Image (spheres, rainbow, N blue to C red):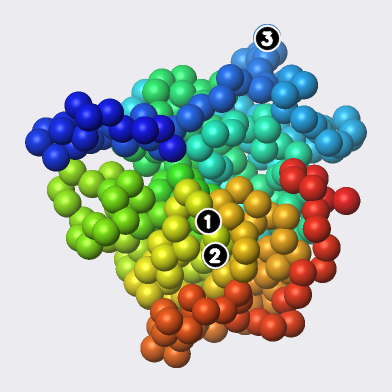
Amino acid sequence: MNNLSFSELCCLFCCPPCPGKIASKLAFLPPDPTYTLMCDESGSRWTLHLSERADWQYSSREKDAIECFMTRTSKGNRIACMFVRCSPNAKYTLLFSHGNAVDLGQMSSFYIGLGSRINCNIFSYDYSGYGASSGKPTEKNLYADIEAAWLALRTRYGIRPENVIIYGQSIGTVPSVDLAARYESAAVILHSPLTSGMRVAFPDTKKTYCFDAFPNIDKISKITSPVLIIHGTEDEVIDFSHGLALFERCQRPVEPLWVEGAGHNDVELYGQYLERLKQFVSQELSIACPAVSGRQYHVEELASRSGFSSHLTSIRSVEFPHWK
């Protein structure tokens, strides 16, 4: 996270319109694009070209399973979208909102590996100002971006809401929570989520101010779909307490995954991660996701445990973004 200057701190408290710009500076770190999209003469087919920095881990056959295109948001930006066909018999498609310092090119190998292992297709998009997407990354654009992605997923591919799992990682939990609070889906997965921007910058913040950015904590109770929360207990960017607080506010929380010893960027390296997702997708969703009552598991108990299922042991260490 970038450091705030004295003048920015003053603006944060004295000039409420300014925090949005400061939040954008803190939250969005778009990398130099690691891919390009080339359109054919018909204007309907796009070809994905990955740079070396995308670190593609697979063959051209897997790359052929990736379809890319551009769509326009309600804010007028054109955003890049990626549909990864990982499994021919997949029941669910993940609508995946990635973290703040990567783009679709860098995530493409991860999507192939993840989707093939949990038997899901994956639809993702780049935020405004990321990758091939136009515009600038802002909170309002985040919400418009995921809305456009949701509409494209439903209209272009005919995928119904009951077959969509909304998945957000880190800053990606912000548009994911906002969308899930307005539309019902098969389920929601929040990976290293934050409660709000102020609570990340100032951990002692107890309430949501009118100028607070990314207020997941005030929206999550509106989600009627089952919610799985995944968080590392040693997260150095978004404290573990954020995951706990959001869990307590969920209408339909399922058994969460607290990964003991994991930080912000290495949860995927723990075997529990894949095992929990497999169990959730292949077993729990098929039996309508029995919810875990917040009264059953107190925050104190959650914080002292690495996870709820003792049988979800670490099966192996894997190399991000490709599992061997």
- Name the residue: 71% across, 45% down: 111
Front: mark 3 or 2: 2
Q: Tell me if I can see residue 77 in this picture.
A: no
Residue 264 place in picture, x, y as percent: 56, 51
In the displayed image of the protein, which residue is found farthest to the bottom?
296
The residue mark sitting in front, 1 or 3, is 1
Query: Disc number at residue 41?
Result: 3
Query: Circle 1 sits on which residue?
Result: 235
Looking at the rendered image, the quarter that the N terminus falls into is top left
Q: Report the front residue among 304 and 294.
A: 304
Give yes or no for contact between labels 1 and 2 (Cβ–Cβ under 8 Å).
yes
Q: Count every numbered label the image shows and give the total.
A: 3
Name the residue: 60% across, 74% down: 306
Query: Which label sits on residue 314?
Result: none
Viewed as shown, does residue 217 lie left or right of 191?
left
Q: Residues within 10 Å of mark 1 (few under 14, many from 20)?
A: many
- Amino acid residing under circle 1: Asp
Alpha carbon separation for disc pair 1 and 3? 47 Å
Furthest residue toward front? 6
Q: Which residue is mark 2?
A: 233
Residue 11: quadrant of the picture? top left
Position above or below: 248 against 132: below
Q: Position of residue 141 (x, y in %)?
A: 36, 33
